[in-house]
Image (tube, rainbow, N blue to C red):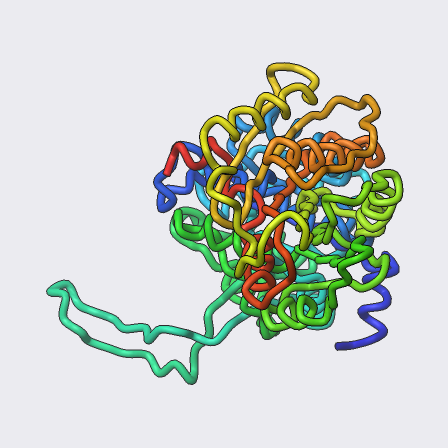
Amino acid sequence: MDVSTSAEIESGKITVDVILPAAGSSERMKLPVSKQFLQVQGKHIVAYTVDSFHRLPWIRHIVVTVDSAHIEFTQKLMSNYGFNRVIVCAGGSTRHRSIFSGVNALRKLPDYTESGLVIIHDSARPLVPADIILKVAEAAQLHGAAGVTRPLVSTVIKGDASHMLTESLDRRHYRNSEMPQAFRYNVIASAYEKCTQDDFDFGTECLLLALKYSKCPAFLVEGTEDLWKVTYQKDLFLLDSVLKAKNSIVSVWSVLKDNPVSLEEIWSELNSKLIQKTEGDGAANTFVILLDPLETLHLDDLTFRISNQLRSLPHSSVNLRPLLLLIFVSNEIVQERPGLEFDNSCLQDGEISQSSQLIRKHLVSSDVTISSQCSSLGVQFTAEKLDRSHCPDLTLDSHVSHVQFMQLCLNVLQQVKVKLKTKESVDFITTGVISKITSLAVNEMVELISLRSSCLDNQVLSYL
């Protein structure tokens, strides 16, 4: 990396704009909604992509080109996410026409300059690392054009009209062209101005246009594994898993007094699963809290610590919503069990029904969504809005019921919502009471963290 060029880019001396074509119909996804507007982990795919660039202060403008029918919707969407450097304009009927629309949109801006850089990326490639963005911008400044590549995974072959093999390419001499790509503005603008109708209708490679019409060969930047494009329905589930794995930051702590637990095994298991963790009061969005149901829980202290750790997270418009995993540990209530499992009586319809009624008492209105999932591992509830009245501390006796567990969990969740003053929902999972933290219990904790909230937006699931 050229240090001086990178410094000029990051300081804003070299202007950098971004174009995200998002006017496609996503035919291969086979859904009634374009893939960039689908939600994963409660956020739109295009929002993850925009956030990857918007979080970089040296990016000046981000132009999103969409179908003309989606302009107003996309403008409101960007505003709701707090993206204040986004320009939404009409795209075209093909990829190249949409990108050219973005190039022309930049030209109309009052701070337009031909000496700046333009990064082109796909709206459906939400996982783009900041260092790759900087590397491709730096390479474009030095060489005029640059693009990210990856090694070919599959062999590329050619067949004739009779479906007979005629040629096979040597993978050692070819690469996969990925995104992002970057250009000096005058290089890419000049290339598009010289394009033929055939280029606009059937072309897909911007680097080739720069070579063909601007006589500018691109520098190839080695990419990373996470630059793949959401294309098929299975990719939605992959994206969900990757987002949770990459963005979950776990904090584990115990408020047990008479039943101390070593956290070393929990840390070790988190490390083995490559899950990010933080020690002490570092930034976190996922909390594993060991509680004694027979002890009075001081909610103010607990929620103060949680809210401080959440506020320490780097700013992002697409953060994962917080997850609280409450684990009750007591020798006095239950006999030893191998893992984090409920007594079967806790899962009977009557008990769950009572819990749901109890939860509804703490909700603001009937239009609030509640989702619950019950299994041998735990019960997960998602509450979108909670009543902001004060909940007193609660001590459970040795005849604790499932409903009382939910009361205790709701108190914790409610206090966190109040202190965070957030409109975001907060997920929490509670377990039955266990006598000690076993290896199996630790494994199940990690499984619950990785499951996190529901996989996809309910509307998306209805399409699949």
Q: What residue sits 66% from the left and 33% below the top?
A: 404
Query: From the image, which quarter does the N terminus lie in?
Result: bottom right
Q: Nearer the viewer, residue 260 or 69?
A: 260
Q: Residue 66, how many percent across, how many down?
A: 55, 36
- Looking at the image, residue 118 lies above or below residue 47: below
Q: Nearer the viewer, residue 437 or 313?
A: 437
- Residue 115 visible? The answer is no
Q: What residue sits 64% from the left and 67% below the top?
A: 270
- Looking at the image, residue 362 lies above or below residue 233: above
Q: What residue sits 55% from the left and 51% below the top?
A: 122
Q: Nearer the viewer, residue 349 or 425?
A: 349
Q: Residue 51, how many percent across, how many down?
A: 69, 47
Instruction: From the viewer's perspective, tell me whether residue 438 is left or right of residue 97.
Output: right
Occupied quadrant, residue 446: bottom right
Q: What residue sits 40% from the left and 74% below the top?
A: 153
Number of numbered labels in the structure image: 0
- Looking at the image, residue 357 lies above or below residue 157: above
Q: Residue 170, how many percent across, how many down?
A: 35, 83
- Looking at the image, residue 109 lies above or below residue 95: above
Query: From the image, which quarter does the C terminus lie in?
Result: top left
- Residue 123 visible? The answer is yes
Instruction: From the viewer's perspective, tell me whether residue 13 is left or right of residue 35.
Output: right
Instruction: From the viewer's perspective, tell me whether residue 234 is left or right of residue 423.
Output: left
Q: Residue 265, how many percent across, how many down?
A: 67, 71
Identity of the residue furthest to the top in this view: 366
Instruction: From the viewer's perspective, tell me whether residue 210 is left or right of residue 185.
Output: left
